[in-house]
Amino acid sequence: MDFTLVIHGGVGVLPPDELPEGMEAAYRQGLTDSLNAGYEALNGGGSAVDAVEVAVRAMEDDPVFNAGRGSSFTIEGENEMDASIMDGRTHEAGGVGVVKRARNPVSLARVVMEKTPHVLMAGDGADQLAREHGLGPVPPHYFWTERRWEVLQQRLEKGTPYGQRHSGATEEATAARPGNDGAEENLHDPNLMGTVGAVAVDRDGNIAAATSTGGRVGKLPGRVGDSPVIGAGTYADNRTAAVSSTGLGEFQLRILGTKTVSDLMEYRGLSVDEATKEVHGRLETLG
Ligand code: ASP
């Protein structure tokens, strides 16, 4: 095989018959468009970094996913986006957090990686960088979608607590969390999630990973998830693997799961499957 591309549209699994009318087709179309964009890059001799950027960008442009246009809202009804990208050949990386005006946060993350001396930028400074590189500003309503707005209203009406439980957490671990009244989010509901990501191997055998998200619905303004953090949301190393994560960022940030996958492969000789299973196991111990 000359090259490889794998994408994800975020955690959240509902049986097709429970999805709103037309939603399955919309997801399938969005995933196909993303794969096609990445395929074209790789087939044309582009790098793994090029491929993951365009694959993620296609999903950011598609309002069905919780990234770029169609992002989730904070509890105050704003879109604040996070993204990152990493080159497995050079170990260079870039991430952006709490971005409000950049059309494609993943491309801004690439700008951070390639055009600044930094790895992680956030807030107004990141939006300013987007302006300087022609990636913004886009008006806030560009990111607005009725579907995500309704999900925020439901959360506000029901008073569903934010991030109360990780799908794998044990009852005991969940109950032990301070302030936990036992309420639970439906962690299979794609309306609550939909972070996107891509990993690729190019014709030269180099690998890369990228991730982008609007974050979890109802987060506090200024909250930064795992997606822009190298080693948490995204990691790539030619010697091991390229990894893009989805799920509740507050858990992933505590174990730096994508870097841990790479470390388990490098230092303990695990396969990518074994390393990923071990990291899932660790996530499930968190409450
Ligand atoms: N990891 C993302 C975050 O916590 C959300 C998700 O993947 O659904 O911001």
Image (spheres, grey):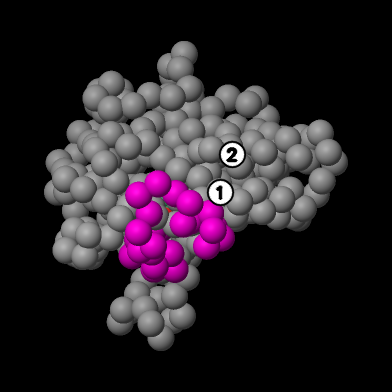
Q: Secondary structure at mark 2?
A: helix
- Residue position marked by numbered label 1 in the rendering: 286
Report crowding for label 1: few under 14, some 14 to 19, many 20 or more residues within 10 A (C-alpha): some
Closer to the eye: label 2 or 1:
1
Instruction: Tell whether position 234 is magenta.
Output: no
- Does mark 1 have its CB less than 8 Å from ligand 1? no
Q: x, y (%) of residue 256?
A: 58, 37
Magenta stretch, overall SS: loop
Mark 2 Cβ inside 8 Å of ligand 1: no
Position in image of residue 29 (x %, y %): 41, 69
Q: Earlier in the sequence, mark 2 or mark 1?
A: 2
Query: Residue at 35% across / 75% down in the picture?
Result: 23
Image x and y of residue 197, in percent = 50, 50
The residue that mark 2 highlights is 255
Nearer to us in this view, 83 or 15? 15
Q: Is residue 14 left or right of residue 159?
A: right
List x then y, in percent, for residue 165. Answer: 44, 57
- SS for callout 1: loop
Give neighbour class at mark 2: few <14, some 14-19, many 20+ (Cα, 10 Å).
some
Q: Residue at x 63, y 26 (%)?
A: 91
> Relative to 39, does residue 123 appear above or below in the rendering?
above
Asked whether the viewer can see residue 129, the reply is yes
Name the amino acid type tagged 1. Leu
Q: Which residues are magenta?
A: 169-195
How many discs mark residues in the rendered view?
2
For the point 46% across and 57% down, which residue is it?
175
**Mark sitting on residue 243:** none
Looking at the image, do the residues carrying marks 2 and 1 touch, with CB atoms under 8 Å apart? Answer: yes
**Taking 257 as reference, is 136 above or below it?**
above
Residue 228, quarter of picture: top left
